[in-house]
Amino acid sequence: MSEPAKIKIKATFKTFTKKKGLKRVADEKTTLQLQQLIDELSLYRAASSYKAHLRAVITGSSTKMKEHVSERLTELDQTAQASTSYGDVNILVVDKMAHNAEYYTKTLEALNIIEDFNDPTSSGMFKCKLVVKSTSLNVLPEVVKRTYELVDELEQRLSECKVMESDSVVDEHYYKFVAPRLSMAKDIHADTVKYNQIYNKIKVLFSAVSSTGTYPRVFSYKGFCMHWEDVFTSSNYINKVKTYISAKDFAEGTDLKKRFDLALSQFCKQDNLITHKYLLDQEDYLCADCYID
Protein backbone atom coordinates (compact mmCIF):
# COMPACT_ATOMS: atom_id res chain seq x y z
CA MET A 1 0.00 0.00 0.00
CA SER A 2 1.38 3.37 -1.00
CA GLU A 3 1.53 6.24 1.43
CA PRO A 4 0.04 9.66 0.58
CA ALA A 5 2.34 12.48 -0.44
CA LYS A 6 3.82 14.61 2.32
CA ILE A 7 1.74 17.58 3.28
CA LYS A 8 2.93 21.08 4.04
CA ILE A 9 2.84 21.89 7.73
CA LYS A 10 2.50 25.41 9.08
CA ALA A 11 0.85 27.28 11.91
CA THR A 12 -1.89 29.73 11.05
CA PHE A 13 -3.56 32.29 13.26
CA LYS A 14 -6.44 34.67 13.04
CA THR A 15 -6.32 37.97 14.87
CA PHE A 16 -9.56 39.81 15.37
CA THR A 17 -11.35 42.05 17.81
CA LYS A 18 -14.30 40.50 19.64
CA LYS A 19 -14.86 43.47 21.90
CA LYS A 20 -14.23 47.07 20.95
CA GLY A 21 -10.66 48.05 21.76
CA LEU A 22 -9.44 44.46 22.37
CA LYS A 23 -6.82 43.33 19.89
CA ARG A 24 -5.93 39.66 20.00
CA VAL A 25 -2.32 38.73 19.33
CA ALA A 26 -0.69 35.29 19.27
CA ASP A 27 2.22 35.50 21.69
CA GLU A 28 5.24 33.39 20.81
CA LYS A 29 5.44 31.47 24.10
CA THR A 30 1.85 30.17 23.99
CA THR A 31 2.08 29.42 20.29
CA LEU A 32 5.21 27.34 20.82
CA GLN A 33 3.58 25.47 23.72
CA LEU A 34 0.56 24.57 21.59
CA GLN A 35 2.72 23.49 18.65
CA GLN A 36 4.91 21.30 20.85
CA LEU A 37 1.88 19.65 22.41
CA ILE A 38 0.36 18.95 18.99
CA ASP A 39 3.70 17.56 17.77
CA GLU A 40 3.64 15.21 20.74
CA LEU A 41 -0.03 14.42 20.20
CA SER A 42 0.62 13.27 16.63
CA LEU A 43 2.96 10.56 17.94
CA TYR A 44 -0.01 8.81 19.55
CA ARG A 45 -2.73 9.65 17.04
CA ALA A 46 -2.49 6.34 15.17
CA ALA A 47 -2.95 4.36 18.38
CA SER A 48 -5.97 6.44 19.40
CA SER A 49 -7.68 6.11 16.02
CA TYR A 50 -6.91 2.42 15.74
CA LYS A 51 -8.30 1.67 19.18
CA ALA A 52 -11.55 3.40 18.17
CA HIS A 53 -11.60 1.19 15.08
CA LEU A 54 -11.06 -1.97 17.16
CA ARG A 55 -13.87 -0.99 19.50
CA ALA A 56 -16.23 -0.38 16.58
CA VAL A 57 -15.62 -3.73 14.84
CA ILE A 58 -16.10 -5.65 18.11
CA THR A 59 -18.94 -3.81 19.82
CA GLY A 60 -20.63 -2.02 16.91
CA SER A 61 -24.38 -2.62 16.76
CA SER A 62 -24.35 -3.87 13.15
CA THR A 63 -21.33 -6.19 13.38
CA LYS A 64 -21.54 -9.98 13.09
CA MET A 65 -19.70 -10.28 16.41
CA LYS A 66 -22.35 -8.19 18.18
CA GLU A 67 -25.17 -10.10 16.49
CA HIS A 68 -23.75 -13.51 17.42
CA VAL A 69 -23.00 -12.57 21.04
CA SER A 70 -26.44 -10.97 21.46
CA GLU A 71 -28.07 -14.23 20.38
CA ARG A 72 -26.01 -16.39 22.73
CA LEU A 73 -25.76 -14.17 25.82
CA THR A 74 -29.17 -12.77 26.71
CA GLU A 75 -29.37 -12.60 30.53
CA LEU A 76 -27.49 -10.63 33.18
CA ASP A 77 -24.49 -12.38 34.73
CA GLN A 78 -24.11 -14.77 31.78
CA THR A 79 -20.53 -15.22 30.60
CA ALA A 80 -18.57 -16.81 27.76
CA GLN A 81 -14.89 -17.57 28.02
CA ALA A 82 -11.96 -19.07 26.17
CA SER A 83 -8.23 -19.55 26.65
CA THR A 84 -6.30 -18.31 23.61
CA SER A 85 -2.71 -17.76 22.59
CA TYR A 86 -3.20 -14.07 23.44
CA GLY A 87 -4.74 -14.61 26.87
CA ASP A 88 -8.05 -15.47 28.47
CA VAL A 89 -11.07 -13.91 26.77
CA ASN A 90 -14.21 -13.26 28.80
CA ILE A 91 -17.45 -11.91 27.37
CA LEU A 92 -19.80 -10.63 30.06
CA VAL A 93 -23.41 -9.53 30.09
CA VAL A 94 -23.77 -6.25 31.99
CA ASP A 95 -26.69 -3.93 32.60
CA LYS A 96 -27.24 -1.02 30.24
CA MET A 97 -28.45 2.42 31.23
CA ALA A 98 -31.38 3.67 29.15
CA HIS A 99 -31.27 7.41 28.54
CA ASN A 100 -34.75 8.05 27.19
CA ALA A 101 -37.89 9.86 28.33
CA GLU A 102 -39.73 6.71 29.43
CA TYR A 103 -37.08 5.58 31.91
CA TYR A 104 -36.30 9.11 33.06
CA THR A 105 -39.98 9.69 33.88
CA LYS A 106 -40.22 6.45 35.88
CA THR A 107 -37.06 7.37 37.79
CA LEU A 108 -38.27 10.90 38.59
CA GLU A 109 -41.56 9.50 39.89
CA ALA A 110 -39.73 6.99 42.08
CA LEU A 111 -37.70 9.82 43.61
CA ASN A 112 -40.84 11.99 44.08
CA ILE A 113 -39.45 14.75 41.88
CA ILE A 114 -42.33 16.84 40.57
CA GLU A 115 -41.17 19.29 37.91
CA ASP A 116 -42.50 20.29 34.48
CA PHE A 117 -39.72 19.24 32.11
CA ASN A 118 -42.01 19.49 29.06
CA ASP A 119 -42.35 23.29 29.09
CA PRO A 120 -42.83 24.16 25.38
CA THR A 121 -41.64 27.75 25.92
CA SER A 122 -38.10 26.54 26.61
CA SER A 123 -36.67 25.45 23.26
CA GLY A 124 -32.97 25.80 23.90
CA MET A 125 -30.20 28.36 23.98
CA PHE A 126 -27.02 29.48 22.25
CA LYS A 127 -23.71 29.16 24.05
CA CYS A 128 -20.11 29.73 23.06
CA LYS A 129 -18.37 26.38 22.73
CA LEU A 130 -14.80 25.39 21.90
CA VAL A 131 -14.82 23.32 18.70
CA VAL A 132 -11.89 21.01 17.98
CA LYS A 133 -11.22 19.26 14.67
CA SER A 134 -8.38 16.75 14.68
CA THR A 135 -9.15 14.30 11.86
CA SER A 136 -6.56 15.90 9.56
CA LEU A 137 -3.86 14.47 11.82
CA ASN A 138 -4.67 11.10 10.27
CA VAL A 139 -2.96 12.04 7.00
CA LEU A 140 0.33 13.08 8.56
CA PRO A 141 3.10 10.81 7.21
CA GLU A 142 4.12 9.58 10.67
CA VAL A 143 0.50 8.74 11.55
CA VAL A 144 -0.10 6.91 8.27
CA LYS A 145 3.13 4.92 8.68
CA ARG A 146 2.22 3.84 12.20
CA THR A 147 -1.35 2.94 11.14
CA TYR A 148 -0.02 0.62 8.41
CA GLU A 149 2.22 -1.02 11.00
CA LEU A 150 -0.76 -1.66 13.28
CA VAL A 151 -2.80 -3.10 10.40
CA ASP A 152 0.03 -5.46 9.44
CA GLU A 153 0.50 -6.51 13.08
CA LEU A 154 -3.18 -7.38 13.43
CA GLU A 155 -3.14 -9.45 10.23
CA GLN A 156 -0.22 -11.44 11.62
CA ARG A 157 -1.93 -12.01 14.97
CA LEU A 158 -5.14 -13.12 13.28
CA SER A 159 -3.24 -15.73 11.28
CA GLU A 160 -1.41 -17.02 14.37
CA CYS A 161 -4.25 -17.00 16.91
CA LYS A 162 -5.06 -20.33 18.55
CA VAL A 163 -7.90 -21.29 20.89
CA MET A 164 -6.70 -23.84 23.40
CA GLU A 165 -9.92 -24.21 25.36
CA SER A 166 -13.37 -22.66 25.12
CA ASP A 167 -16.95 -23.11 26.22
CA SER A 168 -19.76 -23.82 23.80
CA VAL A 169 -21.56 -20.53 24.39
CA VAL A 170 -19.79 -18.61 21.61
CA ASP A 171 -18.51 -20.23 18.41
CA GLU A 172 -14.73 -20.72 18.38
CA HIS A 173 -14.06 -18.62 15.30
CA TYR A 174 -15.49 -15.59 17.11
CA TYR A 175 -12.89 -16.03 19.83
CA LYS A 176 -10.26 -16.07 17.07
CA PHE A 177 -11.82 -12.86 15.78
CA VAL A 178 -11.85 -11.02 19.11
CA ALA A 179 -8.71 -12.25 20.91
CA PRO A 180 -6.10 -10.73 18.53
CA ARG A 181 -8.01 -7.44 18.47
CA LEU A 182 -8.21 -7.29 22.26
CA SER A 183 -4.48 -8.00 22.42
CA MET A 184 -3.86 -5.10 20.02
CA ALA A 185 -6.02 -2.83 22.18
CA LYS A 186 -3.97 -3.92 25.20
CA ASP A 187 -0.64 -3.16 23.52
CA ILE A 188 -1.65 0.33 22.40
CA HIS A 189 -3.59 1.19 25.56
CA ALA A 190 -0.73 3.20 27.12
CA ASP A 191 -0.39 5.28 23.94
CA THR A 192 -4.13 6.03 23.85
CA VAL A 193 -3.98 7.21 27.45
CA LYS A 194 -1.09 9.53 26.57
CA TYR A 195 -3.01 10.83 23.56
CA ASN A 196 -6.03 11.72 25.69
CA GLN A 197 -3.90 13.42 28.35
CA ILE A 198 -2.13 15.61 25.79
CA TYR A 199 -5.40 16.31 23.93
CA ASN A 200 -6.95 17.58 27.14
CA LYS A 201 -3.89 19.71 27.94
CA ILE A 202 -4.18 21.39 24.55
CA LYS A 203 -7.85 22.21 25.07
CA VAL A 204 -7.32 23.51 28.60
CA LEU A 205 -4.40 25.72 27.56
CA PHE A 206 -6.11 27.18 24.49
CA SER A 207 -9.38 27.66 26.34
CA ALA A 208 -7.63 29.59 29.11
CA VAL A 209 -5.55 31.94 26.93
CA SER A 210 -8.27 32.61 24.36
CA SER A 211 -11.18 33.16 26.74
CA THR A 212 -9.63 35.11 29.61
CA GLY A 213 -6.55 36.44 27.82
CA THR A 214 -5.91 38.18 24.51
CA TYR A 215 -4.82 35.17 22.48
CA PRO A 216 -6.67 34.67 19.14
CA ARG A 217 -9.79 32.55 19.35
CA VAL A 218 -8.82 30.53 16.27
CA PHE A 219 -5.77 28.25 16.04
CA SER A 220 -4.59 25.72 13.49
CA TYR A 221 -1.42 23.65 13.29
CA LYS A 222 -0.75 20.41 11.41
CA GLY A 223 -4.45 20.28 10.61
CA PHE A 224 -5.39 20.33 14.30
CA CYS A 225 -7.90 23.19 14.46
CA MET A 226 -9.59 24.93 17.38
CA HIS A 227 -12.05 27.79 17.40
CA TRP A 228 -14.90 29.20 19.45
CA GLU A 229 -18.37 28.96 17.99
CA ASP A 230 -21.91 29.88 19.04
CA VAL A 231 -23.71 26.54 19.25
CA PHE A 232 -27.42 25.97 19.77
CA THR A 233 -27.98 23.61 22.69
CA SER A 234 -31.25 21.74 22.48
CA SER A 235 -33.33 21.95 25.62
CA ASN A 236 -35.17 18.64 25.22
CA TYR A 237 -36.66 16.59 28.02
CA ILE A 238 -33.48 14.61 28.76
CA ASN A 239 -31.26 17.71 28.80
CA LYS A 240 -33.68 19.53 31.09
CA VAL A 241 -33.65 16.68 33.60
CA LYS A 242 -29.84 16.51 33.57
CA THR A 243 -29.56 20.29 33.98
CA TYR A 244 -32.06 20.26 36.86
CA ILE A 245 -30.18 17.50 38.71
CA SER A 246 -26.77 19.17 38.24
CA ALA A 247 -28.10 22.54 39.41
CA LYS A 248 -29.78 20.96 42.43
CA ASP A 249 -26.61 19.18 43.55
CA PHE A 250 -24.51 22.30 43.02
CA ALA A 251 -26.87 24.68 44.82
CA GLU A 252 -27.83 22.45 47.75
CA GLY A 253 -24.87 20.09 48.05
CA THR A 254 -27.11 17.04 47.56
CA ASP A 255 -26.37 13.67 45.95
CA LEU A 256 -29.38 13.66 43.63
CA LYS A 257 -27.39 12.53 40.60
CA LYS A 258 -26.09 9.50 42.48
CA ARG A 259 -29.58 8.56 43.65
CA PHE A 260 -31.04 9.18 40.19
CA ASP A 261 -28.44 6.97 38.48
CA LEU A 262 -28.99 4.18 41.03
CA ALA A 263 -32.76 4.24 40.59
CA LEU A 264 -32.45 4.39 36.80
CA SER A 265 -30.09 1.41 36.87
CA GLN A 266 -32.58 -0.62 38.91
CA PHE A 267 -35.37 0.01 36.40
CA CYS A 268 -33.06 -1.02 33.54
CA LYS A 269 -32.14 -4.25 35.36
CA GLN A 270 -35.80 -5.06 35.95
CA ASP A 271 -36.43 -4.85 32.21
CA ASN A 272 -33.26 -6.81 31.41
CA LEU A 273 -31.64 -4.02 29.42
CA ILE A 274 -28.19 -5.38 28.72
CA THR A 275 -24.97 -4.85 26.81
CA HIS A 276 -21.75 -6.84 26.55
CA LYS A 277 -18.25 -6.29 27.85
CA TYR A 278 -15.14 -7.92 26.35
CA LEU A 279 -12.22 -8.63 28.67
CA LEU A 280 -8.70 -9.91 28.09
CA ASP A 281 -7.15 -11.42 31.20
CA GLN A 282 -9.90 -9.71 33.23
CA GLU A 283 -9.05 -6.23 31.89
CA ASP A 284 -11.29 -4.01 29.75
CA TYR A 285 -9.05 -2.51 27.07
CA LEU A 286 -11.99 -1.29 24.97
CA CYS A 287 -13.30 1.09 27.60
CA ALA A 288 -14.26 4.54 26.42
CA ASP A 289 -11.45 7.06 26.67
CA CYS A 290 -11.64 10.28 28.66
CA TYR A 291 -11.83 13.54 26.69
CA ILE A 292 -12.77 17.00 27.85
CA ASP A 293 -15.88 18.07 25.97
Image (tube, rainbow, N blue to C red):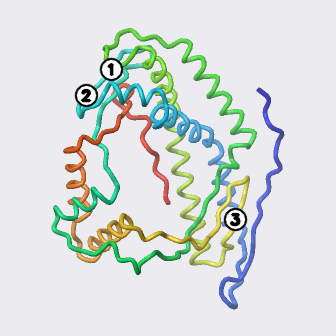
Pointer 2 with pointer 3, Cβ within 8 A: no
Looking at the rendered structure, the secondary structure element under dot 2 is loop
Residue assigned mark 1: 81
Where residue 141 appears, x then y in whole percent? 75, 39
Q: Amino acid at mark 2?
A: Gln
Pick out the residue farthest to the front. 120
Pick out the residue farthest to the top. 164
Tell me the mark number nearer the camera, choosing from 2 and 3: 2
Q: Residue at x 71, y 83 (%)?
A: 17
- Above or below, 175 against 186 in this view is above
Residue assigned mark 2: 78
Where residue 190 appears, x then y in whole percent? 50, 38
Name the N-terminal-most of marks 2 and 3. Answer: 2
Tell me the mark number nearer the camera, choosing from 1 and 2: 2
Q: Residues within 10 Å of mark 1 (few under 14, many from 20)?
A: many
Residue assigned mark 3: 219
- What quarter of the picture does the N terminus occupy? top right
Viewer-proximal residue among 31 and 225: 225
Q: Amino acid at mark 3?
A: Phe
Looking at the rendered structure, the secondary structure element under dot 3 is strand
Name the N-terminal-most of marks 3 and 1. Answer: 1
Viewer-proximal residue among 193 and 164: 164
- The answer to which image quadrant residue 53 occupies is top right
Q: Amino acid at mark 1?
A: Gln
Q: Residue at x 52, y 75 (%)?
A: 127
